[in-house]
Amino acid sequence: MGLIEVFGVMYFTVVCAAQDYVDYEDVTAMFMDRTGTPSPDNSSIYGVTATLSNTFPTSKASTQPKIVYEPPVPSLHLLSPWGDVFPFEKAVFECRVNDSTEWTFTWSRNGHPVQEGDRNVSLISLARAALTITAASQADGGLYDCQAHHKLKGDSLSSNLLELKVYENTPIPALVPDPKLEQMFPGESVTFQCMINVSSGWEYLWYHNDKEIQRCHNNICEIVSLALSDSGQYHCKAKRGGESPFYTEKSKIFNLQVSEPPRPSLKLRTSWSDVFQMESVAMTCDVGSPDWTFTWHRNATELREDPAVVLSLGGVLLNITSASRAHQGLYACKAHLESRRVSSDFSNMESITVYENIPKPSLRKDPVLNSMYIGETITFTCQVHMGSGWLYSWFRDGNELAVADASLRIHLSPHERGTYWCKATRGQRTSTDISERITQDVLAIPLPSLTLSSQWADVFPTESVLMSCAMADGSGWTYMWRRDDEVLSSDDTVYLGPGGANLSIASASASHRGRYSCSGKLPSRSVSSKFTSGVTLRVYDRKPKAKLEQDPEHMVLHTGDPVSYSCRVNVSSGWEYVWYKDDTQLGVSGMNYTIDSLRKTNAGSYKCQAIRVKAIDIFKTEQSRTLKLQVDERPTANIIVLTGWSEVFSTDSLVLTCEVKGSKDVWNYTWFSKGQQLVNSSSDRYTVTPQNDPEQSQYICQGIRSGRPSYSKGSAPLTTRNLLLKRRVLLSISGCIVFGIAAVFFGCLVLRLTRKPADDDEGPEEGELFLTMAQLKDRDDAPCPLVDYVTDVELNAPAKEEVDIIHTEETVTSQDDQAVTTNSSEKHPEVEGSLVSFQH
């Protein structure tokens, strides 16, 4: 019997063929599976790979193909619309095997079996199975797969993997109103937007006062024209899914208040509504919010332009500067919110009456007696029978009395004698004529005068106060003092001088606050004056402290910077200021102390103190805070010549560079020539050529930057002419020396080789073998480059006047350059300053 090859199967059927026929015909039994069902084509069996025996006489059996069973791969599908779910939302998976129906299925999550008791339900039907996941936590998320199992054919391969994402919390939509106003007015529009930033497939639900809004179906709900009934609480939420939808949490509640625009309130700022011509009238219109503007109406007609009517503060204030009969009428105002096109109803109305002529007041006296005596009482009455809001002024013998009422009641005393009249005023412009005059003859008791001898009526603890009370004639009077309603006598804190003429407080305290007045009395007679109007004494709770400010406020400044200090005391007056630096008083005064240009010596600690000097003593405030000032040296710019001395003959330019010594900051640079700023020269390098510097002048550079310090000191001036001359003279001398030595050496060598033997008396002397410098100068075959250079026609030009030159340390490249420059200037003074270009 032949070999049978089996791969990965549990069940198989062997084919048996009969051999008792003559012609060896193949007799092949029908393949049967375990259920007795024939194979469809007798050529393949699930899970079997068979090779028939070669013992048959014929070759039919051996020509059958090998039978190979490959385990099926289930396909896993997500039946629910989303692969990301929230707590208590369901996800449904489906596992399918297409080639048979008798399969059972197992499920895995992240490689671990899923049990039916884990809040999951597995439903098996025909050739597929469904797994429903009701997410309870993020642990239900992960990678899911399935595997099919057949009781005859064995296990399938694992399906594809599908990921299920489970969010930790149920989402909360964000409700965004536009505009974001909690109070709106009828006719305005508002748009609400409900936003969820996770997952998809949401259907939005809108609620007004917990009742669903049917007119809004997407994530935007617009209310075009608001009504009062639209006030209330708005929120939204979302859902997704079909028969058993999943709902989000509801959004935060937005309280919308729809109310009628506020009715403005009209108020009369002047004290009266009936006025005379040329008087002023002021009214205000207010709704309690600064966003509103206002229009004014007279007799229900909006006010037109009128030079006498001034509107200010966006229409809040109406001021009739000079009233006339045309301004009489009923006034009202309306409020407008122009940005939202909202207008209010009319405000309350105010009636304005305008009179033509100002009346004259009438004066009456009660009792009607010409002469009266001390201690009696008389009453004068002044009255204007037109208009309102009058203030009355009383006069006696031309002196105004301190009474503003319509009635003047007098307890007669000697000083009350005289001629009385009155007049009425209101506002700044309206004043009546004076009334008729009434003369009253009486022996008057004079009113003492109260004088504050110290300079201020508001004092600080420990300051002294001095007051004096005196009668006009000054003889025989004693004085009584009172503070508010309390009669004063001498004690430990208040001292009354002889006869009570003076009141002094040596050290003021809070107990001394009040209004002080005095009265005079004649002890020999029962005559007492009235108390004076008095002086109010204010005593602060504590000593003030001077307030010190610095401008600019930086603690670290640089030399050359300005700085200003201000010292102030915010209470009382009469202050003088003392300044200190490092606890040493400065010889300056005034509330401001300014240093226009800082030096290193200005560094230190600054503070101030305020004083005020009275006749009795000096009062000092607490010293201010201490401000420390650090003054750093401003960095200095420096010019460096980049063109080497060996390049003088080979280049037509001189390259200068600018740097700020010791600074690691990033700088821009400004270049100056002859005191003028060079345009287009903000780089740290500047190239000098015969074209841009024919006169070879001075150069200065300065560093600038946006930080602090904002600029550096200027560099020392660098003169290009002197620098070039030094280097060329050095090159000329060096070349002359080298060339001279070489000429002498080769001359001697030539003479040595071409010399003929001669008698000793015909040979040159030993000293003539070497030429002197004068002889070399006269010879044509050994010219000196320095001689040719210094005798050039261009170098014989007259020297131009130079500006003062100050070289930086970097300008002089070496001590040899200095020596050469010095020697050259001594030997050839005509060459100094004659160089006009860098290359010829």
Image (cartoon, rainbow, N blue to C red):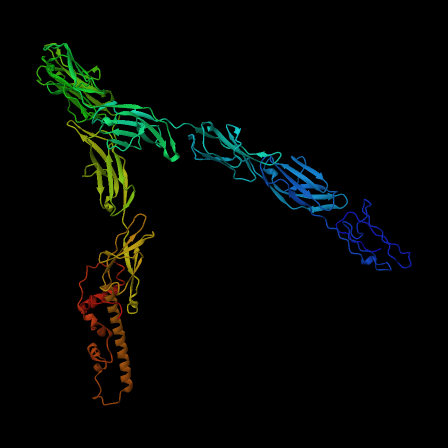
Name the residue at 25% across, 76% down: 740
Residue 113, quarter of the rendered image:
top right
Tell me: residue 453, above or below residue 372: below
Q: Nearer the viewer, residue 198 or 322?
A: 322
Q: Quadrant of the N terminus?
A: bottom right
| Total marks in image | 0
Tell me: residue 648, above or below residue 659: below
Name the side, left or right, on which 661 lies relative to 157.
left
Q: Nearer the viewer, residue 415 or 622?
A: 415
Q: Nearer the viewer, residue 108 or 187?
A: 187
Residue 493 visible in this rendered orientation of the protein: no
Residue 134 visible in this rendered orientation of the protein: yes
Name the residue at 26% across, 89% down: 756
Name the side, left or right, on which 65 lies relative to 129.
right
Residue 739, position as x, y percentages in the image: 27, 75
Tell me: residue 575, above or below residue 521: below
Residue 163, position as x, y percentages in the image: 61, 43
Residue 310, position as x, y percentages in the image: 26, 32
Name the residue at 78% across, 56% down: 65
Q: Quadrant of the C terminus?
A: bottom left
Q: Nearer the viewer, residue 789 or 166?
A: 166
Residue 833, quarter of the rendered image:
bottom left
Name the side, left or right, on which 690 lies relative to 440.
right
Residue 519, position as x, y percentages in the image: 15, 16
